Amino acid sequence: MKRQLWFLLVLSCFFASISNAQNTSQNTSPTINLSKYELKISTEKISEAESVEQMYVSVRVDGVSEKVKNSDYKYTVSGGQIVGEGNNVQWNLFGVKPGTYTINLEITEKGKISTANRSITLVDEMINCGLVECPVVSVSASDDFVKIGESVVFTANVSGGNLEVKGYAWTISSGVIVKGQGTSQITIKPDPESDSKSITATVEINLLENKTCPNVTSETIQVKENN
């Protein structure tokens, strides 16, 4: 009898551990880790070979099941390009201007899509060596997500510095700009025909007499279907 009780106890612990492991797997979400979150760049021309060490950032994704295939990872970036596939890739930022750029990830596993994003700031190493005082630029969204058929507002923010703003140029990863192109605020509607589950709005701010200050930045929100 004691042996039977002991066997049942061991069996119940075994199934409990499996259940906990499954729940942990279901509750985990992908996270993006970059080898650098700020990158100093030079205005001097460098060769492609020299750029490998200076302008390539390693990207590692954690919190994903080993069963997810490399082809299930979908990366989009607001500047530069992704080299490789799967959960270990390189972000090539060669030739990209100073500014803040975002890497977005969508992972499809058993029909379910998980998302993650991170940002990196590229700073000219000669900034503030002269009389130029750079402003802080950023983008904010009116909400964390937008539903199909609705709209969301992105706003470019400029604070501090001693450079005059002369204009704004917006690009978006998906959707349609309803109004505001050329201004500090745009309204976007998601494209109902698109498979993208996120929208990244990137703005390049035209700063008068600017040659060194970061003037490109972006923000990402999620797209949700109507229930």
Image: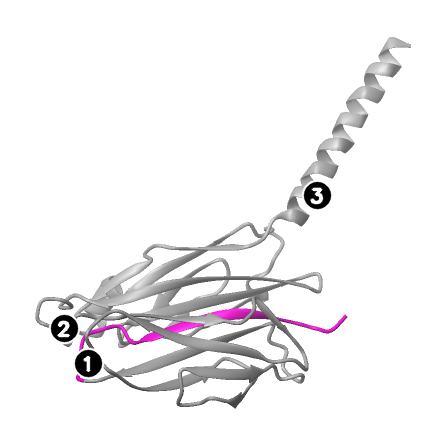
Q: Which residue is mark 1?
A: 210
- Kind of element beneath mark 1: loop
Say whether disc 3 or disc 2 marks the residue closer to the N-terminus.
3
Name of the residue lying farthest toward the left: 130
Question: Which is nearer the eye, 10 or 217?
Answer: 217
* Tag 1–tag 2 contact (CB < 8 Å): yes
Left or right: 84 as drawn, with respect to 20: left
Is residue 159 shown in magenta? no
Q: Which residue is mark 2?
A: 132
Marks 1 and 3, how far apart in space?
53 Å
The amino acid type, in three-letter code, at marker 3 is Gln
Say whether disc 1 or disc 3 marks the residue closer to the N-terminus.
3
- Circle 2 packing at 10 Å, graded few (<14), some (14-19), many (20+), is some
Q: Give the residue displayed 34% in from the left and 69% down from the top.
A: 100
Say whether disc 1 or disc 2 marks the residue closer to the N-terminus.
2
Q: Which mark is residue 22?
A: 3
Image: 25 above or below 111: above
Q: Give the residue displayed 48% in from the left and 65% down from the top.
A: 85
Res 60 → quadrant = bottom left
Image location of residue 46, percent across then percent down: 16, 73
Name of the residue lying farthest toward the top: 2
Residues drawn in magenta = 209-227
- Circle 1 packing at 10 Å, graded few (<14), some (14-19), many (20+), is some
Q: Give the residue displayed 70% in from the left and 37% down from the top.
A: 20
Marks 1 and 2, how far apart in space?
8 Å
The amino acid type, in three-letter code, at marker 2 is Val
The amino acid type, in three-letter code, at marker 1 is Asn
Question: Which is nearer the eye, 80 or 190?
Answer: 190
